[in-house]
Image (cartoon, rainbow, N blue to C red):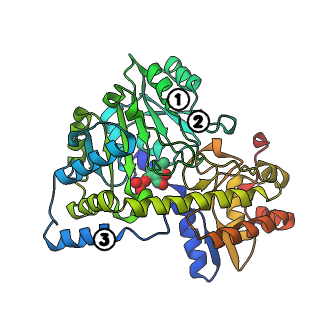
Amino acid sequence: MSIPFSHFASQVQPESAFTVLAVAKELMAAGKQVYELEIGDSPFCSPPQAVEAAVQAIESGQTRYGPSVGLDDFRASAADYVNREFGIEVTPDHLIAGHGAKIFEQLFCETFVNPGESVLVFSPHFPTYPANIERRGGRVCLQPLEERHAFRPQLDSIKEFLDREECPRAVFLNSPHNPTGGVTTLEDLQGIARLLEGTEVSVFSDEPYDQMVWSGRHHTMLEVPGMIDRTVAAYSFSKSFSMSGWRLGFAVSSPAIVARMGMLMNTSLSCVPPFIQEAGVAAMKESILLRDQQMATFRENVTHLVQSLRRVEGVDCSMPGGSFYAFPNVSQICRKNNITSHGLAMYLLEGADDQRGVACLGGECFGDAGQGFLRLSCAESRESLGDAVAFIDEAFGQCEKIATYLDQNPNYRMAESMF
Ligand SMILES: Cc1ncc(COP(=O)(O)O)c(C=O)c1O
């Protein structure tokens, strides 16, 4: 007898990058050479200072439960870090440690969203946002991020959300943006703040790529006076410090919101392991030079990847304002071959060649608004990126192979409404 799953568990969608990663690994295990541009993970080792601090902390017995909001030392170091980076003035009680940035999507929704209340998400969007809103029974309201606006959130979309929805409760922002690379300006943030004044709408500001802004500098909603009282800004060690497997991040908000999230953390994950937090302290204090060198490499790689993609016939690719992703527009190729962009991505991995393949994501992995785009991560060596684009160039030219792949995988055929 099979016991029914909850409605939520029955329809939950995992992050598709992990699904494509699993297919790529399977093909690689079977001997295929795959250029892995599907997952947003740094190719660099974690900072040696962080590794050493973690080992020392384990050896000195920091292996027990700790406070749910985080160790004093971690919170103080993270407060210093954001004050230095963003020119703000927060104290350790504005800080809470978390298991990466992603956990704060859930904690934020648990803190603010009641069943039936509406949450605005700009789309294309990071694929775990809907799951974390729906976990609370919230209503996901999508508004477009468009290439013609450099993938920046538009104030009209927020006005429409506030006017149309019966119970508007929260807005999700993400800058630099995954997958588009769009960067929200300080003026955008100030405009959004003005619109939210006097409402009961809170802001989740997802900022794991804060160190990857390629023109100008990163701006956070925390800079806008008063907004910290309705904003949870989430940061991660995964991208800036190449520590994705450590599962470490933190959020900044008002002390009252932090205390409330601490209680929610207490009822679920208890705390971030203390020795992991010590590694984070060392990274924030001692690995800044290394971090900046690695960010410079990402910037060079993104520029190189974008320039190479622009030379591929049928591909348009704007330079992202931030992040280590390129988000080329391949709609011309999709229309010509009657294939969805995710189908095109899977063709590059599975169908274009028996010996070699490129793993990347179709824009649909980030919602329907991503149709017609691919997302390629530049977290590979320059040489591999060059080889991957040469492979893509050749593969896009082989229309018969695309047609054969589509015959074998008709689910990737473009619906008429997509033309
Ligand atoms: C926009 C966005 N938010 C959150 C995350 C999750 O990051 P973390 O590893 O810190 O949980 C990612 C990771 O790719 C991301 O791109």
Callout 2 secondary element: loop
Q: CA distance from mark 2 to mark 1?
A: 8 Å
- Between 135 and 195, the residue placed more toward the observer is 195
Label 2 belongs to which residue?
152
**Which label sits on residue 51?**
3
**Which label sits on residue 220?**
none
Image vertical order of residue 169 relative to residue 67, above or below? above
Which comes sooner in the sequence, label 1 or label 3? 3
At 42% from the left and 38% from the top, the residue drawn is 205
Task: From the top left corner, tell me how far across and down residue 316 is, in percent.
Answer: 76, 50
Dot 2 beta carbon under 8 Å from ligand 1: no
Label 1 Cα neighbours within 10 Å, binned few <14 / some 14-19 / many ≥20? some
Report the amino acid beneath label 2. Arg
- Between 377 and 224, the residue placed more toward the observer is 224
The answer to which quarter of the image holds residue 310 is bottom right
Task: From the top left corner, tell me how far across and down residue 192 is, in percent.
Answer: 48, 25
Q: Quadrant of the N terminus?
A: bottom left
The answer to which quarter of the image holds residue 395 is bottom right
Q: Is 257 positioned to the left or the right of 175 in the image?
A: left
Label 1 belongs to which residue?
188
Q: Do the CB atoms of the residues marked 2 and 1 lie less than 8 Å apart?
A: yes
Q: Quadrant of the C terminus?
A: top right
Which comes sooner in the sequence, label 3 or label 2? 3
Q: Is 60 positioned to the left or the right of 11 in the image?
A: left
Q: Do the CB atoms of the residues marked 1 and 3 lie less than 8 Å apart?
A: no
- Between 407 and 222, the residue placed more toward the observer is 222
Which comes sooner in the sequence, label 2 or label 1? 2
Report the amino acid beneath label 3. Val
Q: CA distance from mark 1 to mark 3?
A: 39 Å
